[in-house]
């Protein structure tokens, strides 16, 4: 077919059906090809191979092959190998044969071609992190700096920069060489500009750092050209940011050039370097430097100085010290910001208001009352109105202003009404990007105080009605409808829906695209409006192109229907509602199994719904148990049982044992929530909060039942502080129900003194069940969206030659097990938490003995050997080694499991788990036997391998 390029290489190296060995073999064929094009194609595929299979044995073999290509190939192939080394920086330290790799590449340094020598130097520079102290390479770099070929010299400078950043020895030894070249007359000006950045890495030794700083300060007056000044100031700033001790002097120097140098480029770079030095903290700046900067910015008339100057000040005011110094309205900084917060330039006004907001919020967090808070709010409102009324759209600056508004609302909830009223007046008078930005701000404020959105309901509904009538809406209008529906869900949280609001939502869904409808239904489920979600998911079920999507939507529909049936007013009784909800949850779990694929196994979703169904079943069982008190009388021998067991609660007979069984069921349900919590490493904070609340609900039920059916039990002081502070909006209704249940449960304490199960206690338990069943369950975000994706992949050696077979170990010997692993990330690594350490656990258990007449004691089979090791990953790679002993022959099962520890020392049972089978033969003893017809002094030993040969053994006399 014309126009189609046919290649022998697999386009998808990461497909599950192709393992690492076959992928490497395929690329190796390309490297051995006689065509340069196929060789280049094979080389450029190696970075993708490294990302998919980042294990040392593969990377070491691959880079050695590439080193051979570098040694034998042409300059173009060498350049391709150089690009592979530059793109695979985090995998370089997995090379085990570093000497061999260096030897093959270093052979090219003796080439007569300066281009080949230049590519070799750049290759060594790209791998400097693994060979920082190689003296032969240091010598080659020094020699190439004196070359007459400019390409080779530039490559030597690049390599020198890389090695100076890694090696203290090289940095110290090169200091004089670089200094002489910079000061020498024979070095061209362009070459000097490239050499000066090497000095920024001369910070390994105090004396060297001082000498380098002195050299650069001497160069400043000697080379006043703009290019030299910019490069030298950049080098001094990088050096000061690393050493920290030179920050005061460098800040003073930058302020000097900012004030005295008339060139705009120098002033701009000075402000940029001050911004970099402000990040370590204002406490490192010299006394009065911040005030000098504020004075200079205050007196400037140029916006190109004012804007970056305000950016530097904004970083400085993140320090509480500076905020407290300028919390009074008469300070110079407050005057500066007050002067420019009404600027006609939106960028300057937004920056000034951002500084004022930071000062005000910092004072609020420290319980201090800043001056002029109302002025800050007034300026912020003015800016928001100016931006929304302006014909020129500036969504970037509007976002900054709205973030300031949200921060003020977080610091003081009293300001929520002020900003919601302001944004509500502009909501129906704007369009485009501004509508989405304002909806996001309203959603953020509504999450803090949702009742403030109630006055804006009419505006939101009318805007939704208008958008619903638009034919062929664009993407912006569709997104706006989703945001407005989400605002309604936030506002209606905890309130009863009226017919008009439901009609507006269903009117939006009627002519909307399918993905937008799914987003609306998902938002409804997240905020607990399951009736709305049921209707929308039911419409979507038959409108998808994939069978897996169909069952996923069917699962969501059944789940929402289950939750909606719990607080359905038409239901006859509490037990009927609970049974109906459990039935729908079982259907949802069945649909979810059909929706699962190998790439999306939906484990969290299935376990979450299974635990929820288990909890509802426990509630139904508790109601059945409570009814036993009136139906099943105590047995005639109840008094005898009480006397024998000394348990007064046994006087009530069957109900006591059933209540205690319910205690175990709720405890088991709480444990399941905790185990699921430990596996959700990538979950967002709201999801973790949701699971914590559900677990504590189980604890609350467990305590209430123990108070009724056991002696000496008290409700512990709040199993969880079910307070409304810092609770996400999605979980507030659930927390409110928990508070109500806890208040009702306090009535159980009145009858707890007597060991009697009364009708009052039973009615209280039913009331608690009613409250918890009627509570709207918000589906956590992690159920629908995974914002952070982290996975651990393990490689265990040794492996059996044939998959599924066992590993044979000789009796009396030990097995060395090496576990290597790599941490793989999604689009946003470390969004919520990151992996600090990995715990590798190896469990060894005897499964069965060898085929002998001896019967193995069951206690021996129950013995388990557990070895654990905690390792810290380096560039997402880790390894651990174990030495396992097997005390007796038989077949052993080795289970290898990984768990991770985050930066706050929390342990997460993320897995994965792998298993191996080890077979150990029984140690055979050599026993002497007697043979008829032989002398008594002759003993015969039968060898296990060759029992046909009988060798007489004569005793020594």
Image (cartoon, rainbow, N blue to C red):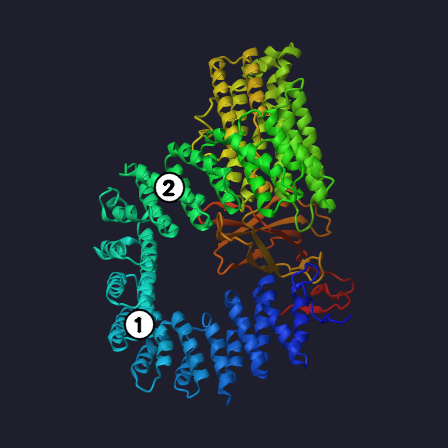
Q: Residue furthest bottom?
A: 112
User: How far across and how far down the image is residue 352, in percent?
Assistant: 33, 48
Front one among 386 and 763: 386
- The answer to whether residue 868 is above or below residue 213 is above
| Quarter the C terminus occupies | bottom right
- The answer to whether residue 463 is above or below residue 253 is above
User: Taking the image as drawn, is residue 741 in sight?
Assistant: yes
Front one among 501 and 530: 501
Dot in front, 1 or 2: 2
Q: What's the CA distance linking mark 1 and mark 2?
A: 42 Å
How many C-alpha atoms fall within 10 Å of the one at disc 2: few (<14), some, or many (≥20)? some
Q: Earlier in the sequence, mark 1 or mark 2?
A: 1
User: How far across and how far down the image is residue 938, in percent?
Assistant: 70, 66
Q: Secondary structure at mark 1?
A: helix
- The answer to whether residue 167 is above or below residue 623 is below
Q: Which residue is mark 1?
A: 229
548 horizontally vs 817: left or right: right
User: How far across and how far down the image is residue 18, in percent?
Assistant: 69, 62
Front one among 872 and 386: 386
- The answer to whether residue 614 is above or below residue 79 is above
User: How far across and how far down the image is residue 112, in percent?
Assistant: 50, 90
The image's mark for residue 782 is: none
Quadrant of residue 5 within the rendered picture: bottom right
| Quarter the N terminus occupies | bottom right
User: Taking the image as drawn, is residue 320 in sight?
Assistant: no
Q: Secondary structure at mark 2?
A: helix
The residue at 51%/39% (across/down) is 686
Quadrant of residue 165 within the rendered picture: bottom left
Q: Which residue is mark 2?
A: 382
């Amino acid at each position: 077919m014309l126009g189609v390029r046919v290649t022998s290489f697999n386009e998808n190296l990461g497909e599950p059906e192709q393992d690492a060995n076959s992928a490497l073999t395929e690329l190796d064929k390309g490297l051995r090809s006689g065509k340069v094009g196929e060789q280049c194609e094979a080389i450029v595929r190696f970075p993708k191979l490294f990302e998919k299979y980042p294990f040392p044995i593969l990377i070491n073999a691959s880079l050695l092959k590439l080193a051979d290509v570098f040694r034998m190939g042409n300059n173009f192939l060498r350049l391709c190998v150089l690009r592979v080394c530059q793109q695979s920086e985090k995998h370089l330290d997995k090379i085990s044969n570093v000497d061999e790799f260096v030897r093959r590449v270093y052979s090219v340094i003796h080439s007569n071609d300066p281009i080949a020598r230049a590519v070799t130097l750049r290759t060594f520079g790209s791998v400097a992190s693994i060979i920082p102290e190689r003296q032969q390479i240091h010598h080659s770099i020094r020699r190439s700096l004196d070359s007459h070929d400019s390409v080779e010299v530039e490559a030597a400078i690049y390599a020198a920069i890389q090695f100076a950043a890694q090696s203290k020895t090289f940095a110290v030894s090169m200091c004089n060489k670089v200094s002489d070249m910079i000061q020498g007359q024979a070095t061209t000006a362009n070459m000097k500009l490239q050499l000066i950045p090497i000095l920024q890495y001369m910070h390994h030794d105090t004396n060297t750092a001082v000498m380098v700083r002195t050299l650069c300060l001497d160069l400043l007056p000697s080379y006043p050209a703009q290019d030299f000044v910019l490069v030298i100031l950049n080098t001094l700033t990088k050096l000061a940011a690393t050493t920290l001790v030179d920050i005061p002097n460098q800040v003073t120097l930058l302020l000097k050039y900012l004030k005295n140098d008339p060139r705009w480029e120098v002033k701009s770079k000075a402000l940029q370097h001050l911004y970099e030095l402000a990040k370590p903290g204002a406490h490192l700046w010299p006394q009065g430097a911040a005030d000098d900067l504020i004075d200079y910015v205050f007196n400037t008339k140029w916006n190109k100085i004012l804007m970056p100057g305000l950016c530097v000040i904004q970083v400085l005011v993140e320090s509480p010290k500076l905020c407290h110094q300028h919390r009074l309205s008469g300070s110079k900084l407050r005057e500066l910001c007050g002067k420019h917060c009404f600027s006609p330039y939106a960028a300057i006004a937004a920056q000034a208001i951002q500084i004022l907001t930071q000062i005000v919020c910092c004072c609020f967090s420290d319980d201090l009352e800043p001056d002029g808070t109302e002025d800050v709010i007034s300026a912020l409102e003015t800016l928001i109105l100016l931006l929304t009324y302006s014909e020129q759209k500036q969504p970037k600056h509007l976002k900054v202003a709205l973030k300031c508004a949200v921060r003020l609302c977080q610091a003081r909830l009293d300001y929520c009404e002020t900003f919601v009223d302001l944004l509500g007046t502009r909501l129906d008078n704007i369009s485009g990007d501004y509508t989405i930005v304002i909806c996001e701000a309203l959603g953020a404020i509504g999450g803090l105080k949702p009742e403030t959105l109630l006055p804006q309901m009419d505006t939101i509904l009318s805007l939704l009605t208008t958008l619903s009538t638009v034919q062929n809406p664009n993407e912006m209008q569709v997104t706006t409808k989703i945001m407005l529906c989400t605002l309604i869900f936030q506002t209606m949280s905890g309130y009863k829906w009226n017919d008009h609001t439901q009609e507006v939502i269903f009117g939006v869904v009627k002519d909307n695209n399918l993905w937008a409808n799914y987003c609306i239904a998902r938002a409804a489920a997240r905020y607990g409006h399951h009736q709305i979600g049921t209707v929308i998911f039911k419409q979507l079920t038959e409108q998808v192109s994939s069978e897996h999507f169909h069952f996923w939507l069917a699962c969501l529909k059944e789940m929402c229907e289950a939750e909606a049936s719990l607080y359905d007013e038409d239901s006859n009784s509490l037990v009927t509602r609970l049974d109906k909800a459990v039935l729908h949850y079982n259907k949802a779990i069945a649909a979810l199994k059909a929706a699962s694929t190998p790439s999306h196994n939906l484990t969290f979703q299935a376990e979450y719904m299974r635990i929820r169904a288990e909890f509802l079943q426990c509630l139904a069982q508790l109601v059945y148990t409570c009814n036993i008190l009136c139906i099943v009388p105590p047995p005639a021998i109840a008094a005898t049982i009480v006397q024998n067991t000394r348990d007064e609660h046994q006087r009530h007979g069957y109900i006591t044992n059933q209540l205690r069984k319910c205690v175990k069921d709720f405890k088991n349900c709480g444990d399941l929530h905790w185990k699921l919590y430990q596996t959700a490493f990538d979950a967002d904070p709201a999801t973790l909060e949701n699971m914590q609340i559900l677990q504590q609900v189980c604890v609350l039920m467990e305590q209430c039942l123990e108070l009724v059916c056991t002696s000496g039990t008290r409700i512990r002081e709040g199993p969880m502080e079910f307070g409304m502070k810092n609770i996400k909006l999605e979980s507030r209704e659930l927390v409110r129900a928990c508070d109500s249940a806890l208040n009702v449960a306090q009535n159980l304490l009145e009858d707890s003194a007597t060991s009697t199960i009364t009708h009052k206690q039973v009615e209280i338990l039913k009331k608690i069940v009613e409250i918890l069943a009627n509570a709207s369950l918000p589906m956590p975000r992690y159920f629908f969206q995974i914002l952070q994706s982290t996975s651990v992949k393990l490689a265990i050696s040794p492996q059996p030659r044939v998959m599924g077979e066992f590993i044979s170990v000789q009796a009396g010997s030990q097995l060395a097990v090496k576990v290597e692993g790599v941490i793989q990330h999604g689009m946003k690594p470390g969004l919520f938490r990151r992996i600090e350490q990995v715990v590798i656990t190896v469990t060894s258990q005897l499964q069965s003995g060898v085929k002998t007449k001896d019967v193995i004691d069951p206690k021996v089979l129950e013995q388990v050997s557990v070895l654990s090791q905690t390792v810290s990953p380096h560039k997402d790679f880790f390894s651990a080694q174990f030495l396992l002993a097997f005390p007796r022959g038989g077949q052993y099962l080795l289970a290898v499991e990984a768990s991770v520890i985050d930066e706050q020392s929390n342990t997460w049972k993320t897995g994965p788990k792998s298993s191996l089978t080890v077979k150990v033969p029984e140690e055979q003893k050599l026993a002497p036997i007697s043979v008829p017809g032989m002398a008594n002094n002759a003993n015969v030993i039968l060898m296990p391998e060759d029992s046909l040969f009988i060798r007489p053994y004569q005793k020594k006399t």
